[in-house]
Amino acid sequence: FEVTHTVDCIGGTGDFSSIQDAIDVVGEDDTVMLISNCAEDVEVDVNYINITSDQNGDMNLGGDFTLTGSIFVDNAVGVDIEYLTVTGSTGPGIWFHGASNGSVEGVNSNGNEGSGLLVNLASAVGVDNSTFTNNGTASNYGAGIEVANRSAARIDNSTMNNNFNDGVGVFWDSFARVAGSTLSNNGSFDPFDAGFQIAHHSSVRSNDNT
């Protein structure tokens, strides 16, 4: 049966005091629920789990709490990241890697040195109602969303603003469908950067975007 594991990184009132400790014991279909702000880099290698900070059930963009760090999904399927703010990573804020798949919904990924979301190495992710802003630095490529190396993303009703490199970058035999979304003020670093950058035998289907 499904279990919700609460994480309180500062007050000690949850089931766990770190997200990683909770993930290390979860079973399939379990939820890891942040009930405080946390600062750590998290690795997910278990299937069919949900990570959220929507403690009050109001489904607000960015949720109720912030993770300062990153979420790295490594060769895991059915990983859903919902209603959470992710910031301050020295690489991508959220990274699906190695044939991983899942969803990102109601997430605010901002201020990361790498991309707000990286979908890489034959991974596939659905993105809904999320925001990716102010990602990337001069020393670390950072798009709002980067899809690379035979990966795919479906991006709906989301915003990619003020990212150092591309709003959405799709590279190396990858595909993205982007609909009902806004891309603005991206690509301030390199003249090749843009709202969309599509390269290396990749493709994008775009409709109803600004």
Image: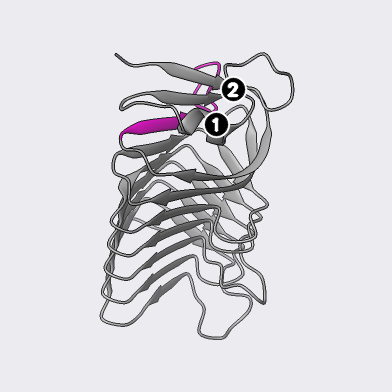
In the image, what residue occupies the spot 39% across and 16% down? 3
Q: Is residue 186 left or right of residue 96?
A: right
Q: Main secondary structure of the magenta part?
A: loop
Quarter-of-image position of residue 55? top right
Q: Which residue position is annotated with label 1? A: 21
Residue 105 within the segment the image draws in magenta: no
Query: Residue 16 shows which numbered tag?
Result: 2
Q: Position of residue 70 (x, y in %)?
A: 57, 49
Query: Residue 208 shows which numbered tag?
Result: none
Q: Position of residue 85 (x, y in %)?
A: 59, 40
Q: Nearer the viewer, residue 182 or 28?
A: 28
56 vs 65: above or below: above
Query: What SS does tag 2 mark?
Result: loop
Q: Is residue 1 left or right of residue 12?
A: left
Residue 50 within the segment the image draws in magenta: yes
Q: Position of residue 66 (x, y in %)?
A: 64, 36
Residue 149 at least partly seen = yes
Q: Quadrant of the N terminus?
A: top left
Q: Nearer the viewer, residue 79 or 166?
A: 79
Q: Quadrant of the C terminus?
A: bottom left
The amino acid type found where label 1 is placed reads Asp
C-beta proximity under 8 Å, tags 1 and 2? yes
Query: What SS does tag 1 mark?
Result: helix
Residue placed furthest toward the bottom: 191
Residue numbers of the magenta segment: 48-60
Q: Position of residue 123 (x, y in %)?
A: 30, 57
In the image, what residue occupies the spot 55% across and 27% down? 53
121 vs 129: above or below: below
The amino acid type found where label 2 is placed reads Phe
